[in-house]
Image (cartoon, coloured by chain):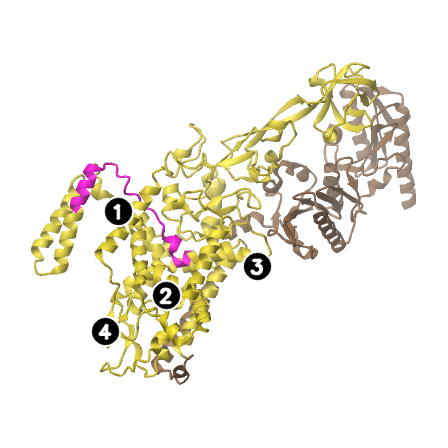
């Protein structure tokens, strides 16, 4: 079997694996549900996820060690991940192959030749990694910190030593100069900009990283559209998510693997890694004169790596098509370098790299000028249970959409601008769109999160039982009554839906009962009295007076009102003896309603949002959950005092 | 593929590499297969939470759905430990009536998924219990009728008791197509279960004349506020527009029935009632200008609650006793 065929089988395998991972990502134990399927394994194989989270957090989450295997194999074999594993690459390849069918060989070859624009992805990677790692220089510029002046001065001195000792070694001299300049810059920044808000780091690789992109697109757009399990799923920002996905595929119809070549930061990272690879594609004719220049090696080249000439080794995705197409059999995969030379690439100018890095470093501080993580935090941004503090959360979330897909009530939705540009596609809870609120006995989102942006919770911790009893349940926010919209508060209409549906025990919503005269039914005159009914000059009313909450008050006042049990032709039937309650002919009477006005107890409310979901006031609910009092943030505590949740930050 | 590739010969090295890759894929597939048996904590947590009780049977609700609707959510199951998570506000009512399990699932119209209803199937253990929760929640003035003897409808809901099950089909909104689908699903459920409420024998003891249709109920516990007065069937009658409640409760023995009748009598006397002249073995009490009658006959307690006068109360109680005697005679 040809290796090209093997490669296609492998691509198909991983594409099915990715789609299957998204498909089964629903809580349940049947074979087509979550069970123990490793739904995030492909994400864990992505080394960019691991590298970026290491830069932002200084730690590598357990599953992300798989990424080091990918990096090691890439260093050994080349960009096999892009050409053989990446599902987005496979999808693009399918689109490219399909659209290429109608093209002439020359046009086909033209679209597969290398292009200077392929450097863009390296610059994007530089910008994204700078954004992720910029805080690493904090110890150098924080002159008031533990080290004081010592770290930057040490760097300068080490640089001078390198310059002095490396007179004949260019890389030592360059490194020495770089260290001296960097140390000086740090000293300057530390003096001029104490408190350095300029050094804000954040994880934004997930926006462009192909694996989170394809997971997100399939989970949030493709599967809800085709609805394989027969459910109707609502997804906010579907047009944006789907639009990006369609654009990526559409561009690959114009230029095969457009995204891989020009945009993909993961491809760029792997392209940098192959510089030291042992095996590589290239021309293997011993004398370098066997090539007839037919150009067939370009016809199906997936990486646009110019295999016939000086091969752009960083661009080669090991598609093996050139070997398949070459009539002279001079293309091969070997430890020997290509006879026509190879460019390990990429050829990037220092200026371009510095510009990209500086752009990445400045974008996040600009986005955070409004202080969205401090005093400017958004209370309507409710994160899933187990989410880290907002800053730590943004430093880990890769926007893959796994938590949104697995949520059994579909209450976790992607943000568009609710969390600012920085939080695009991160998960938030929308209690109106889901089929219910956040289920307080569910730990699914944290259990599938590949980076622990939503940390995995034990059920006991989520519910505040067993050894977590002293800490109480995990709170994601607190419900607030909008008295201007609440039926009992604003309109005198009986309703206790929120109280009835509150799932915590004891209930976080309590009610206080009041008796209130019904407008328009407050100046009635008794016409006639019988043993269980009173005849009144009752006007037409749409109020369901016999619902059990309405009473007829007479001379004895509302305290002694009789419950209305029926209504018939001007007669109000009551439970009890009207005469005993003081009703006589021509005495005044009024209909009063018993209202149970709801109150939220912040000590018991966990912010699950079931009340908001069930509130009968359509549109903007009369009870709404905000992130006040969420467990993850001490700064968002609602009340001082005991009983409040223990903070994680 | 080009002409060249058609003539392509695979080198032994490539063959070995290809074989190695396929082997790796097989190993990955096998590894994934093995891993899927180690359940995700989210799944085990859910299993632990919704694991059916020993006596609980799984009902495949989706299989009962007519063509016009489709599942809108996965089925959920609750037992006595978890019922409060679903219906916290009303759970006590079900517990007192012998609740065993609840299965729920949402269904939406295929052509308009915005219209959905949630089906609640309460397994109450016995038909008596199922009828009890059905009757305790029924409100007056609602349209009776449905696939069973005990069923009623609201604009956005269908409620019925059938065998040991109490069903609620509650729609997101009052929609005719949605309720038609709910009716069809309820009918299918009833046809699948088969049995009906024949077990509830006390129901037949209430005479039809004057009885308000759909007013028969079963109070599981503490009827009329009398502690321990459990499993009491009631029915409402109308006398000149005045409601009167009749009740029947069956006990294990005639002695137990006599004791229960005395407990009821003593309750009313304790709360200020005045005993009136009455036939032998019948207590007639005037309390707050209403008349209470209670008596025991064989294993049954028979009573009339809040009657307007002595004659009405005694007359109704006598009619029930006569019906009971006829039933006993028929059996013997």
- Residue A82 vs B169, above or below: the answer is below
Q: Secondary structure at mark 1?
A: helix
- Residues marked 1 and 4, same chain: yes
Percent across and percent down for residue B17 are 36, 76
Neighbour tally class for label 4: few under 14, some 14-19, many 20 plus, Cα within 10 Å: some
Q: Secondary structure at mark 4?
A: loop
Chain with colour brown in the figure? B
Mark 2 lies on residue:
A81
**Quarter of the rendering containing residue A120:** bottom left
Label 2 is found on which chain of the structure? A
Q: Which residue is painted at 38% across and 84% down in the image?
A: B9
Label 1 is found on which chain of the structure? A
Say which label, 1 or 4, has the lower sequence index.
1
Percent across and percent down for residue A343 are 24, 68
Say which label, 1 or 3, has the lower sequence index.
1
Marks 1 and 2, how far apart at CA: 29 Å
Residue A136's mark? 1
Mark 3 lies on residue:
A228
- Residues marked 2 and 3, same chain: yes
Is the residue under label 4 in contact with that under label 1 (CB below 8 Å)? no
- Residue A649 vs A67, above or below: the answer is above
Q: Say whether residue A199 is magenta.
A: yes
Marks 1 and 3, how far apart at CA: 45 Å
Mark 4 lies on residue:
A341
């Amino acid at each position: 079997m040809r290796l090209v065929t093997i490669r296609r089988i492998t691509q198909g395998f991983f594409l099915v694996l990715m789609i299957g991972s998204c498909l089964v990502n629903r809580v349940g134990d049947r074979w087509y549900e979550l069970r123990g399927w490793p739904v995030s394994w492909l994400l864990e194989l992505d080394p960019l996820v691991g590298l970026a989270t290491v830069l932002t957090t200084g730690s590598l989450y357990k599953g992300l060690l798989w990424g080091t295997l990918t990096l090691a194999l890439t260093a050994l074999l080349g960009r096999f991940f892009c050409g053989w594993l990446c599902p987005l690459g496979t999808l693009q390849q399918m689109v490219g192959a399909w659209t290429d069918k109608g093209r002439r060989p020359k046009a086909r070859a033209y679209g597969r030749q290398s292009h200077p624009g392929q450097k863009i992805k390296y610059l994007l990677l530089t910008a994204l990694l700078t954004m992720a790692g910029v805080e690493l220089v904090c110890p150098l510029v924080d002159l008031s910190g533990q080290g004081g002046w010592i770290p930057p001065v040490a760097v300068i001195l080490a640089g001078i030593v390198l310059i002095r000792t490396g007179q004949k070694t260019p890389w030592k001299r360059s490194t020495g100069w770089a260290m001296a300049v960097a140390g000086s810059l740090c000293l300057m920044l530390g003096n001029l900009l104490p408190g350095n808000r300029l050094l804000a780091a954040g994880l934004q690789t997930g926006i462009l990283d192909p694996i989170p992109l394809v997971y997100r697109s399939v989970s949030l757009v493709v599967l809800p559209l085709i609805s394989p399990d027969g459910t109707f799923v609502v997804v906010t920002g579907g047009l944006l998510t789907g639009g990006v996905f369609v654009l990526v595929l559409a561009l690959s119809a114009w230029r095969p693997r457009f995204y891989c070549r020009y945009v993909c930061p993961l491809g760029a990272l792997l392209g940098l890694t192959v510089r030291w690879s042992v095996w590589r594609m290239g021309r293997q004719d011993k004398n370098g004169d066997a090539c007839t220049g037919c150009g067939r090696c370009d016809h199906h080249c997936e990486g646009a790596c110019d295999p016939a000439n000086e091969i752009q080794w960083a661009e080669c995705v090991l598609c093996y098509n050139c070997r398949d197409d070459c009539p002279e059999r001079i293309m091969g995969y070997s430890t020997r370098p290509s006879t026509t030379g190879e460019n390990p690439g990429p050829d990037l100018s220092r200026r371009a790299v510095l510009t990209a890095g500086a752009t990445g470093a400045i974008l996040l501080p600009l986005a955070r000028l409004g202080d969205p993580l401090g005093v400017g935090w958004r209370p309507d941004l409710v994160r899933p249970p187990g989410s880290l503090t907002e800053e730590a959360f943004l430093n880990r979330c890769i926007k893959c959409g796994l938590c949104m897909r697995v949520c059994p009530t579909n209450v976790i939705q992607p943000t568009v601008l609710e969390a600012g540009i920085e939080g695009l596609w991160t998960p938030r809870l929308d209690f109106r769109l889901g089929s219910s609120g956040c289920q307080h006995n569910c730990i699914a989102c944290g259990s599938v999160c590949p980076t622990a942006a939503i940390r995995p919770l034990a059920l006991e911790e989520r519910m505040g039982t067993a050894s977590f009893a002293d800490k109480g349940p995990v709170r994601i926010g607190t419900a607030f009554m909008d008295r201007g919209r609440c039926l009992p508060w604003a309109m005198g209409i009986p309703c206790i839906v929120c109280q009835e549906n509150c799932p915590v025990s004891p209930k976080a919503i309590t009610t206080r009962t009041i008796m209130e005269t019904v407008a328009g039914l407050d100046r009635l005159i008794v016409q006639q009295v019988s043993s269980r009914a009173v005849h009144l000059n009752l006007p037409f009313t749409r109020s369901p007076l016999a619902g059990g909450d309405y009473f007829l008050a007479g001379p004895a006042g509302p305290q002694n009102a009789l419950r209305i049990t029926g209504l018939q032709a001007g007669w109000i039937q009551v439970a009890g003896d009207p005469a005993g309650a003081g009703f006589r002919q021509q005495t005044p009477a009024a209909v009063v309603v018993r209202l149970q006005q709801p109150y939220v107890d912040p000590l018991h409310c966990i912010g699950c949002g079931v009340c908001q979901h069930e509130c009968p006031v359509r549109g903007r609910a009369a009870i709404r959950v905000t992130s006040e009092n969420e467990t993850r943030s001490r700064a968002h505590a609602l009340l001082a005092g005991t009983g409040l949740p223990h903070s994680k930050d | 593929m080009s002409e060249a590739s058609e003539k392509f010969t695979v080198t032994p090295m490539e063959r070995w590499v290809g074989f190695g890759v396929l082997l790796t894929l097989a190993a990955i597939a096998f590894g994934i297969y093995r891993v899927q048996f180690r359940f995700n904590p989210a799944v085990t947590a859910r299993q632990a939470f919704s694991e059916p009780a020993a006596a609980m049977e799984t009902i495949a609700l989706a299989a009962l759905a007519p063509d016009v609707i489709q599942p809108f959510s996965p089925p959920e199951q609750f037992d006595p430990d978890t019922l409060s998570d679903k219906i916290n506000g009303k759970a006590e009512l079900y517990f007192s009536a012998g609740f065993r399990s609840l299965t729920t699932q949402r269904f939406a119209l295929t052509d308009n998924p915005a219209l959905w209803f949630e089906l609640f199937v309460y397994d109450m253990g016995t038909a008596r219990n199922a009828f009890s929760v059905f009757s305790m929640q029924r409100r007056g003035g609602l349209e009776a009728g449905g696939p069973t003897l005990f069923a009623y409808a609201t604009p956005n809901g269908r409620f019925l008791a059938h065998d040991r099950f109490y069903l609620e089909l509650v729609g997101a909104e009052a929609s005719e197509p949605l309720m038609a689908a709910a009716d069809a699903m309820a009918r299918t459920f009833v046809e699948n279960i088969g049995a009906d409420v024949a077990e509830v024998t006390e129901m037949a003891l209430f005479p039809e004349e004057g009885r308000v249709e759909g007013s028969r109920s079963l109070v599981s516990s503490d009827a009329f506020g009398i502690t321990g007065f459990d499993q009491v069937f009631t029915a409402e009658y109308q006398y000149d527009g005045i409601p009167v409640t009749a009740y029947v409760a069956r006990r294990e023995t005639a002695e137990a029935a006599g004791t229960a009748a005395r407990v009821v009598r003593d309750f009313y006397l304790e709360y200020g009632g005045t005993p009136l002249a009455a036939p032998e073995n019948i207590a007639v009490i005037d309390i707050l200008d209403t008349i209470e009658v209670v008596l025991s006959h064989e294993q049954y307690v028979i009573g009339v609650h809040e009657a307007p006068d002595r004659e009405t109360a005694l007359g109704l109680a006598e009619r029930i006793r006569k019906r009971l005697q006829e039933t006993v005679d028929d059996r013997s």
